[in-house]
Image (spheres, helix red, strand yellow):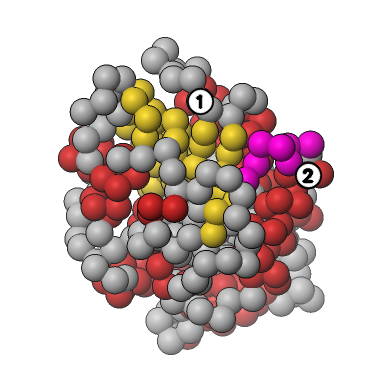
Amino acid sequence: MSEHNGHMPQHDAADGRRQHPGQEPAESGPHHDTARPAHVHGHGHGHGAASGHRHGDTDMDWDAMAPVLEREGELCRPQYEAAANWIAGLPEAPEVRRILDIGSGPGVITCLLAEVFPEAEVVAVDGAGALLERTLARAERLGLGERVRTQRADLPGELELLGEADLIWMGNALHHMGDQGAVLAGFSGLLRPGGVVALAEGGLAARHLPRDPGMGRPGLEARIEAATADWFETMRASLPGSRRETEDWSALLTTAGLRPQGARSFLLDLPAPLSEQARDHVLDGFTRRREMLEGVLEAEDIEVLDRLLDPEDPAGLRRRPDVFLLMARTVHLGRRAASGR
């Protein structure tokens, strides 16, 4: 359910942001991009082929990035919808009257949550005003405008703006916070009794090509994933207040005062040949990987990436028939005790 992801991008994000009760103008409030969670909204730790969020980019053109994040969220909708329905069907599910979508990006998942929880007010929380404006426009188009609100906030510093919630959705957002345990405890404190935090973190990085794509050395995507993991660690270390945590999300939820409610992984399986929308999504991701990993990957791999991105090359992503999209996203749940703490 949320990129931008993402992030990164997304950001789902995808893709890849933050917000409070009631609607606040998207322009208000400070904007410090280095503290922004990704969308969905990016794609997991690899930020998949498509996270739109770049950590530390204070001059990101979110108007230009928004369509990429929206496409990511729409492509990944089956995963998010399945996760939302899983949460809604929990045996101990509370009455969901208010939802916070942390790192909401352009609002694809915000609106999905409003559809799955028809009695709830859903608050899109993000630090980018341009993305929040897209959220409101999307909600109006879908007839959800009366229940979708926005809150511009930079997290974790402006947690007090968000207000209480019955469900807090954090789609690939927590890993953009330096002290993940402290931030999770802060969100736990916003939950009403019986409320749930849904933490989308981890899963399996996206794959798009055969192991041997017919040029260069086989295993290109595995090497890209390894290089991206190194990049991710550098990004994490650079965040304000960064603290290393064992990524045992169940244990982190417990330490934050929540009772783990299990975890499930949701598959996105788009086989070849891809639709044009999905192919565009893959191209966007490889383009960002090419830029990010210049000077990191070996020259041979960079040459292969250049061929993959060449729209005229028969072996490129635009023209080859064997491009697919396969990935898994994991959601971890933690519940606040019904009687409070």
Residue linked to disc 2: 140
323 in relation to 118, above or below: below
Single out the residue that lies furthest toward the right. 141
Q: Position of residue 228 (x, y in %)?
A: 40, 68
Q: Is residue 146 above or below residue 64?
A: above
Question: Does label 2 or label 1 sit earlier along the sequence?
Answer: 1
- The quadrant holding residue 36 is bottom left
Question: In the depicted view, which residue is nearer to us: 110 or 153?
Answer: 153
Compared across the picture, whether 334 is left or right of 137 comes to: left
Query: Which residue in the protein does label 1 denote?
Result: 96
Which residue sits at x=36%, y=59%? Answer: 156
In the rendered image, the quadrant that contains the C terminus is top left
Residue at screen point 31% across, 70% down: 239
Tell me if I can see residue 111 in this picture: yes
Q: Looking at the image, which is closer to me, 110 or 14?
A: 110
Q: Which residues are magenta?
A: 143-149
Residue 272 in view here? no
x%, y% of residue 311? 76, 74
